[in-house]
Amino acid sequence: MKISLGEKVNYYAKCPECGTPRAEGTERCINCGKSLLQITEKDVKVPEDEADMALYKARSDKSASENLKELKGKSKLRYFVDYYLGKVILGILIAALAGGLLYSFLKPKQDPVFYSAIVVSPFTPAGFQQFKADVENLLITDPKHQNVVLDNTYSSLVADYNSGMSFTVHMAAGEIDAIILSKDELKYQVNSEALKPVDQVISKEIYARIPEEAKVKVVPTYPQENGAFVEGEEAVYGLNLEKFLERINGFETSSKYCIAFTSITENYDNINAVVKYIFDIK
């Protein structure tokens, strides 16, 4: 198989300068010394197993699809990898990115009907899933546009900086309705004025039906500019979850956890519904 790749060497029969016939075996004129080399098309023998790759290199003036059709076996695979693979991968990445952006833009926006931070979760995994499912069934009427957020990523609002900052950001965004936390952390949040007294959030009727032993009273302590502290008025700032946790987790617990309500919430109807569920108020 012959493939045109470059130049072929011939010799002039006579010197193009003086006309002297070329002496056999010489490359220059024996009379005037002029070179007798004549440059024409060069024929190169290409081994059969390399012919496809030679064709691949020699026909760069053809379209990529034409070249691919003429190649065989490994040569075709190599040509595809060299010419197409990068473009295919780039196309897939662009399509995936565009699809993700389109989905984010078009998907229905969901607003929380109830948003609670959970500081060091007292729930078993099964108990947590049951709690979330129960609250969703209780409150959600439009699943495409409503959801329930139970954020259990907080380790401590007192001792963990990242948790404290995350809580502050969500509070500033007006998102958090309630906090499930230990009684030790409850007092800290009361002092920081992040919480409302329970009777300012839930209805009087529901508040009256909550057992007295479940009402967690706290005396706020407020720092003054001179370094002193002033005590505020004692009030119920939390509701004890001990009985609820025993019911939802399926075993008795000594965890001193309670639920409290943030000073920014205005989600009173849904909070009332959640409190009735927690304390099994019909």
Image (cartoon, helix red, strand yellow):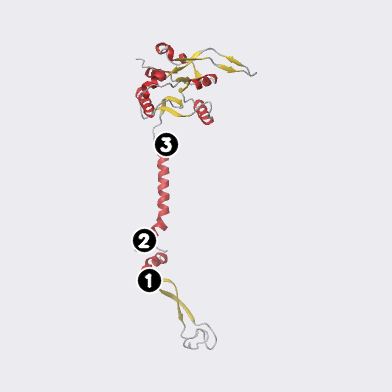
Q: Residues within 10 Å of mark 2 (few under 14, many from 20)?
A: some
Q: Is residue 243 above or below residue 168?
A: above
Residue highlighted by disc 2: 76
User: Which of disc 1 and disc 2 is earlier in sequence?
Assistant: 1
Residue 116, image x, y percentages: 44, 25
The reply, left or right, for residue 173 in relation to residue 211 is right
The reply, left or right, for residue 262 in relation to residue 273 is right
| Front residue (pair 96, 234) | 234
Secondary structure of residue under mark 2: helix
Structural distance between the alpha carbons of marks 2 and 1: 17 Å
> Given the current orientation, which residue lies at the most extreme right position?
226
| Front residue (pair 19, 129) | 129
Residue highlighted by disc 1: 47
Residue 72, image x, y percentages: 34, 63
Disc 2 marks a residue whose amino acid type is Lys
- The residue positioned 40% from the left and 48% from the top of the image is 92
Give yes or no for contact between labels 1 and 3 (Cβ–Cβ under 8 Å): no
Q: Is residue 40 visible?
A: yes
Residue 214, image x, y percentages: 43, 15
Structural distance between the alpha carbons of marks 1 and 3: 58 Å
Name the quarter where the N terminus is drawn.
bottom left
| Foreground disc of the pair 1, 3 | 1
Disc 3 marks a residue whose amino acid type is Phe
Secondary structure of residue under mark 1: loop
Structural distance between the alpha carbons of marks 2 and 3: 41 Å
Residue highlighted by disc 3: 105
- The residue positioned 50% from the left and 21% from the top of the image is 184
The count of marks equals 3
Q: Residues within 10 Å of mark 1 (few under 14, many from 20)?
A: few
- The residue positioned 59% from the left and 14% from the top of the image is 230
